Amino acid sequence: MTDDSPSAEPPASRTPPAVAVVDAQSPGNVGTIARAMKNFGFEDLLLVDPPELDPDGEAYGFAGHAREDVLPNADEISFDHLVENYHTIGCTAVTNEDDNSHVRFPYSTPADLADRLPTVEAPTALVFGRERVGLTNEELARIDEICSIPANADYPVLNLGQAATITLYELRSLTLDETQLPDVERVRAPEPTVDRLYDQWSDLLEELNHPAEKHDKTMRMVRRVFGRADVTEREANTLLGILRRATERPAEDSDSV
């Protein structure tokens, strides 16, 4: 880690935000947060009053591949430096229910932040607090805005590592152009193939003597079902073969009588 320096200045703007952890008690939680950052494309880890991070200890053990870059490149800074140099978003499970107190109200959800943070022209930091008490009211009073994860009202408090992981997952659109999951729009069957699938369904309905007055309504249902399914080209071709065989079968049976 590098020491906080009065001369150190953050960049003029930053998207995605940095991740700041205030006074974490467990090195393992710091490692878990670093790993979540690596999972979802975040790079800048800021530590306020961190525990000892032994390269042979829990933090590096829990960090996975983040032990190679995110964790060793973390910056140790003061809370004063954090709030003076970043647009800060304090993450807390406990919020006020109305506007009688502005310390924990109003607040955004992580999904809200994903839509809005790209427009913030300032270096930004997501701020997570301690394992047991989170961020204090005094700290939250110095933070620019509040974020909270929707959870069970009877038990909304999450583990520090869990809270950071969920928040970073929701904000992954700020960092990742692609994930390991395929893009549905790219694998969907070409429209001419899907249109042939609809034509084959229409032919089958006619061959089965489906009531003519119900034909259009049934085809609308078929289109909506396959529209939601985003069938791949292989799936569409397989279904085309089955439907073609089903359409031809009644004619074959008729010829054999």
Image: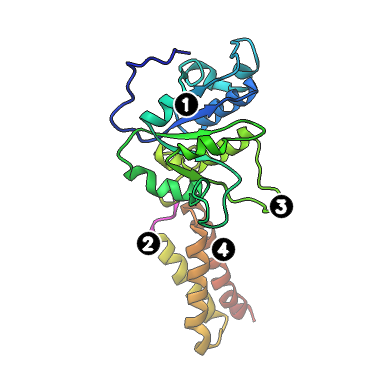
Asked if the magenta segment contains residue 150, the reply would be no
| Nearer mark to the viewer, of 4 and 2 | 2
Q: Amino acid at mark 1?
A: Phe
- Reading the chain from its start, which is encountered first: label 4 or label 2? 2
Residue at horizontal 43%, vertical 55%? 189
Q: Looking at the image, which is closer to me, 232 or 167?
A: 167
Q: Amino acid at mark 4?
A: Ile
Question: Residue 45: which disc?
Answer: none
- Reading the chain from its start, which is encountered first: label 2 or label 3? 3
Q: Which residues are magenta?
A: 187-192
Query: SS class of the residue under badge 2?
Result: helix
Question: Residue 192: which disc?
Answer: 2
Asked whether the beta carbons under mark 4 and mark 3 sit within 8 Å of each other, the answer is: no
| Nearer mark to the viewer, of 1 and 4 | 1
Q: Residue under label 4, please give it.
A: 242
- Reading the chain from its start, which is encountered first: label 3 or label 1? 1
Task: Measuring from the top left, give residue 132's x and y in whole percent.
Answer: 67, 33
Query: CA–CA distance between discs 1 and 4?
Result: 65 Å
| Nearer mark to the viewer, of 2 and 1 | 1
Residue at horizontal 46%, vertical 53%? 233
Question: Residue 154: which disc?
Answer: 3
| Nearer mark to the viewer, of 2 and 3 | 3
Q: Looking at the image, which is closer to me, 102 or 192?
A: 102
Label 4 Cα neighbours within 10 Å, binned few <14 / some 14-19 / many ≥20: few
Label 2 Cα neighbours within 10 Å, binned few <14 / some 14-19 / many ≥20: few
Q: Amino acid at mark 2?
A: Pro
Residue at horizontal 47%, vertical 82%? 216
Q: Give the vertical position of 20 relative to 231 (above or below).
A: above
